[in-house]
Image: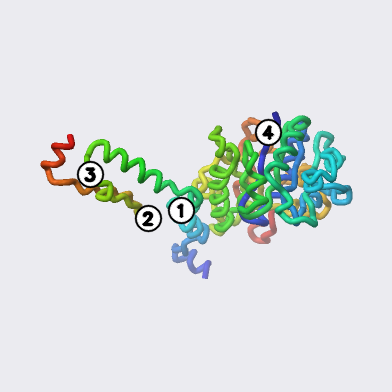
Amino acid sequence: MSWLNFFRGKAEPASADIARDRLTMIVATGGNRRNGDDFLPRMQKDLMEVVLRYVNVDPSKVKISTERGADLSTLAIEVELPPVKEVRRAG
Amino acid sequence: MAQVVTVTSGKGGVGKTTSSAAFSTGLAQRGKKVVVIDFDVGLRNLDLIMGVERRVVFDIVNVIQGEARLNQALIRDKRVETLAILPASQTRDKDALNKEGVAKIIEELSKEFDYIICDSPAGIEKGALLALYFADSAIVVTNPEVSSVRDSDRILGVIQSKSKRAEDNREPVREHLLVTRYDPIRVAKGEMLKLEDVQAILAVPLLGVIPESEAVLKASNAGTPVILDAETSAAQAYADAVSRFLGEDKPMRFVEAEKKGIFGRLFGGRAA
């Protein structure tokens, strides 16, 4: 079929490119190399301290999560603030 | 103080021992005092690749267990004067090695040698961890193939978290990428990962590219480090890698497919 493709001017994707894309997916998301050293708990602790330094909230109302996807990975910090009056008092 | 260089890869069969033998010999050819240690206890092979298998009397385990002195276990190379080999044990298992024992050996070797090359076993278990624990530099041997690249990425993570330098919070282990069994013709056809892609994925400075070469098998058949077969592309590529390791600037060779003439294209044929 390959000589036919030559005339059609259309080629199948090179297998080397498939290999590159698969590896990029594995390696770029960081799950491979950093398996042994999970930084999330430490980062969570540090972020929590920063949030508490500025806002007086119940630590259980701070949620930190990460999600890894094929195209997009996210780090979400969700802080549930107390009613306005209480925030002022804290400041 | 000697520099400890660990040759590692995660995956087996990618050319760690071939590279350890060639690289050590190349450094010694430059007048450096080099000792190469086989860390693959139970499955030693460095002695065979170096062609000294009949001269092994004592090994690293004998030294650690106090059954022999280091100097009795060291095999001095007959081709390159400043090169020595410390073989692994064939009969013990990996548990025969321990951190304290290896530390003592490295300390003692440091007195005589400039470079201590550690030929790591495959995997990320005890033997491999010990081989990389004392490293100042690491040469990560990678084939342009998915499982090898992934395992190299994995071992890079291990180097940066489990080495003594990482534990002591010192300057991290210097990493080098050595791509072996590279076939520019297959790369041109889109059948093999490109050098640039491997490098981009692993993000480690490139020390060298060793082309796929029939000379490697021939050299191992004969027990001659391939770098001594100076006419071959593999030997020249290893010599270049040694130069770069010593800080010289060398352009990469053997990475482009040679343009075949009309006859070459018609009648095929393989690169030497």
Give the foreground label among 3 and 2.
3
Q: CA distance from mark 3 to mark 2?
A: 28 Å
| Residue at the spot 65% in from the left edge and 61% down from the top edge | B266
> Which residue is denoted by mark 3 in the rendering?
A57
Please name the residue that numbered disc 2 is placed on: A68
Q: Is residue B74 above or below residue B154?
A: above
Spatial CA distance of label 1 from label 4 is 31 Å
The amino acid marked with disc number 3 is Val
Q: Which residue occupies the extreme left position in the image?
A: A85
Picture disc at residue B3: 4
Asked which secondary structure carries label 3, the reply is loop
**Marks 1/3: CA distance?**
32 Å
Which residue is nearer to you in this view: A69 or B252?
A: A69
Q: Position of residue B56 (x, y in %)?
A: 86, 48
Q: CA distance from mark 2 to mark 4?
A: 40 Å
Q: CA distance from mark 4 to mark 3?
A: 53 Å
- Say which quadrant the N terminus of chain B sits in: top right
The subunit carrying tag 3 is: A
On screen, residue B145 versus residue B51, left or right, reads left
Residue under pointer 1? A31
**Subunit under mark 1:** A
Tags 1 and 4 both on a single chain: no
Q: Are marks 1 and 2 in contact (CB under 8 Å)?
A: yes
The amino acid pointed to by label 4 is Gln
- Secondary structure state at the residue bearing disc 4: strand
| Label 1–label 4 contact, CB within 8 A | no
What amino acid is labelled 2 in the image? Arg
Marks 4 and 3 on same chain: no
- Quick one: label 3, few (<14), some, or many (20+) residues within 10 Å? some
Are dots 1 and 3 on a single chain?
yes
**For the point 81% across and 47% down, which residue is it?**
B62
